[in-house]
Image (spheres, coloured by chain):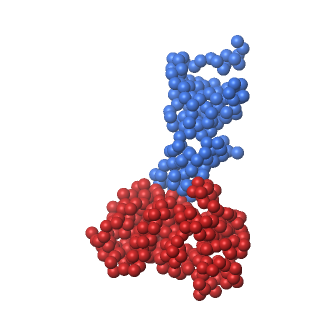
Chain colours: A blue, B red
Amino acid sequence: MDVDRELLVRKIKDGTVIDHIPAGSALNVIKILGLPRGSRNRMAIIMYTSSSKMGLKDIVKVEGLELTSKEVNMIALIAPTATINIVRDYVLVKKERVKIPELIEGIIKCSNPNCISNQDRETAVPKFRLVSEEPLILRCEYCERYTYKKDILRQFGIGR
Amino acid sequence: MKGKDIISILDFDADELIDIFELAKDIEGNPEKYRDTLHGYVLALLFFEPSTRTMYSFQTAMARLGGASLVFSDTSKTSIAKGETLGDTIRMFDGYADAIVIRHRIEGAAKYAADIAEAPVINAGDGTHHHPTQAVIDLYTIWKYRGVIEGLNIGVLGDLKYGRASTSFIYGVSLFKPSKLYLISPEELRLKEEVKSDLDRMGVDFVETTDLEGSLKELDVLYVTRIQKERFPDPAEYERVKGSYVVNMELLKNAKEGLMVMHPLPRVDEISTDVDSSPYAYYFKQARCGVPIRMALLKLVIIGDKNGCR
């Protein structure tokens, strides 16, 4: 088995494998998750690898970390095809596809600077309804403006 | 309707609006019947943004129902100047008043206030977003003078992008299934995408155009709005579009008989004064509907359908 092949298939002991990330988005995923979080989380990032379903895909493996449902939702916003695999003691214990929730609370900011949820000293937590998954459109529950994928990427410093 | 927050005109359906109109009409016909309706009740008027007609018409409405008002309108003299948050201000007034009317330059401020307060909250304008009580007044004007709102050709003219009164009016008439909505504005001031998608969802037939003269002969109602300098993030954008449209008697030569020209006021120069004495002018009648409609709304959200005082 060559080195590349081994990189793709080697199992992690405990942690999370984020698979089926749209090719080229792995770095955005780790940025949104704020990874790595110190030496505890050994990581492998595999980009532009072949996939029977997707043609090309990215994979992120993180040791010593089980993603919370809030983190899974964050991934859904920028990598809607991703699957989350939780591994404990080399055994796959949970596998789920990410799903953008109908109501998204407190993860991202409204694109409207004049929205109450963007006023620093007020406690209005940003809340959005999902309008469309592709293209991604969210609607603020307070000011009712749209927030698009490009706005979300910009918030995480992945602006174009 | 007791305890109901009024954040958007879409918080009502057409039947509820007709109930409000019937009550307002009864109030106009029999004001003495309602003299003590809200005796012993207190209304908080929190105007973080300047207002004349909205604030005074709410205050008048509360007085005519026998209630009292707490007016908070100059933030330079209040605890806001000391740095109090909107959330804390709302909590405080929620302890004093039976209902809260709020105007704020921040979009979503009224909904946020409603989330915090136990008392019903009435949105009197939040930034460029909603102005629902103005829309109830506008719809009542059509209902009262035309007898019907359904099936009309309705034109909305001016700043459809930043205008909260026009947005609320557009949503409001859409509840009554207009025959067609003519959205007449400069290209730069077209309706927001979000509102257009709502109209599509509501199944409203609408057209966007810059052509006032061409649309006019089709219209039963022409709702004119001011292009509001204070809402433009870019002053150069305002300079490009100000004075785009003027409604005058020369233009109205082509109007349908019975056309109602409306305006939420204040106007600057978008309706020429020569229209004022014509049968098309409904904007002063519309302004006079402000107090009875706000009396009806205050009665309904504070004590509901029941009669009488505390």
Res B186 → quadrant: bottom right
Residue sitting at 54 percent across and 51 percent down? A140
The foreground one among A5 and A40 is A5
Residue B105 seen anywhere in this rendered image of the structure: no
| Image point (63%, 80%), residue name | B257
Vertical position of residue B245 compared to residue B123: above or below: below
Residue A156 coordinates in the image, percent (x, y): 61, 42
Quadrant location of residue B152?
bottom right
Side (left or right) of A98 relative to A159: left
In this rendering, is residue B12 above or below A64?
A: below
Whole-percent x, y for residue B161 in the image: 63, 63
Determine the residue positioned at 27% across, 69% down: B310
Q: Quadrant where the C terminus of chain A lies? A: top right
Left/right placement of residue B58 relative to residue B191 reads: left
Measuring from the top left, give residue B206's x and y in whole percent.
Answer: 64, 62
Is A59 in front, or is B246?
Answer: B246
